Amino acid sequence: MYGIPFSLDDDDKMERVYNQDYRGLTKIGTLIGCLILCEQIIDEGYDPLEVCDASSGDLEYAMSALSDIDGPLNYETGDPCQNVFYIHELEMESEWDNAQLKSKITEELPWLVFSFLHVMPDILAFYPAPLAHTPNIAEKERYEVLQKIAAQKIDSALTPGAKEPRGQGEDNLLAFADFYQFSEDDMKFVTRRRYSGSSYPETAKDLQEYAFYEANGFEEAKDSRLLYKVVEPLN
């Protein structure tokens, strides 16, 4: 994001700016994002969540949270054909890092997306990074156990009746894996997709950043920590 002086009325200088030559201009920040064309993806017979999962864990998490019950993309309670602009990063330069200017960029963001990509997003979404916090050790241990169970189930399916040498405790795991049934959350957990309660704890919220986005019309999708805003329709 660059600031262009009001006095920049020289045609040659304007042409240089349009050609992405920003020498002499003031850099005020960096915006990186991704436009998810949900309507087009669905029209072509695909699931936006699956497409995003194949592309990025961040996009999968955002689409999953937005698609939950009561979410704006939920098939029963919302409209899954809404296009989403996911903000990966909005970082202001230190000398221009003020709420007023950042709010103006956020307010104009749908129009900026429309100007560059020719699609007006229906939803803006952003996942604030957590503050430093102690990771949940129990979750890590659960993941390791479920990974072993999943590996054993695959091994048994490929080589039924095979008995491989195992370490201490592995025989018990083998017997347990035979009857263990994965829940939907288990499957998401093992495949590193969003599952119930996978967001970071409330104490790790950056309250200042949350306050800024909430003041600019964003709300949290349940307890996912994902913030989103429905863009006002064009008049």
Image (tube, rainbow, N blue to C red):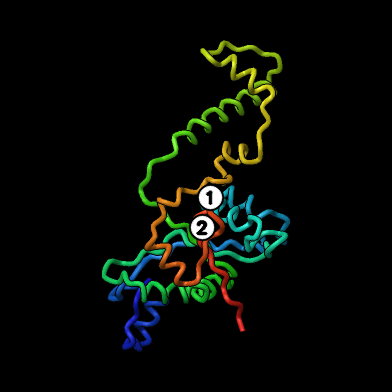
Q: Nearer the viewer, residue 201 or 98?
A: 201
Q: Is residue 180 left or right of residue 210?
A: right
Q: Position of residue 3 (x, y in %)?
A: 34, 77
How many dots with numbers? 2
What's the amino acid at mark 1?
A: Ser
For the view shown, which residue lies furthest in the front direction?
203
Q: Residue at x 51, y 29 (%)?
A: 144
Q: Residue at x 63, y 21 (%)?
A: 176
Which quarter of the image is occupied by the C terminus? bottom right
Crowd around label 2: few <14 · some 14–19 · many ≥20 (10 Å): many
Q: Which numbered disc covers residue 184?
A: none
Residue 189 sits in which quadrant?
Answer: top right
Q: Is residue 185 left or right of residue 20?
A: right
Q: Position of residue 123 (x, y in %)?
A: 57, 67
Q: Residue at x 72, y 61 (%)?
A: 43
What's the amino acid at mark 2?
A: Leu
Report which residue position mark 2 lands on. Answer: 226
Up-down relation of residue 146 to residue 28 (above or below): above
Mark 2: which secondary structure? loop
Counting residues from the start of the chain, the first of labels 2 and 1 encountered is 1
Q: Residue at x 60, y 70 (%)?
A: 122
Residue 92 sits in which quadrant?
Answer: bottom left
Q: Nearer the viewer, residue 42 or 177?
A: 177
- Looking at the image, can residue 56 be seen? yes
Cα distance, mark 2 to mark 1?
15 Å
Mark 1: which secondary structure? loop
Q: Is residue 224 left or right of residue 37?
A: left
Q: Which numbered disc covers residue 56?
A: 1
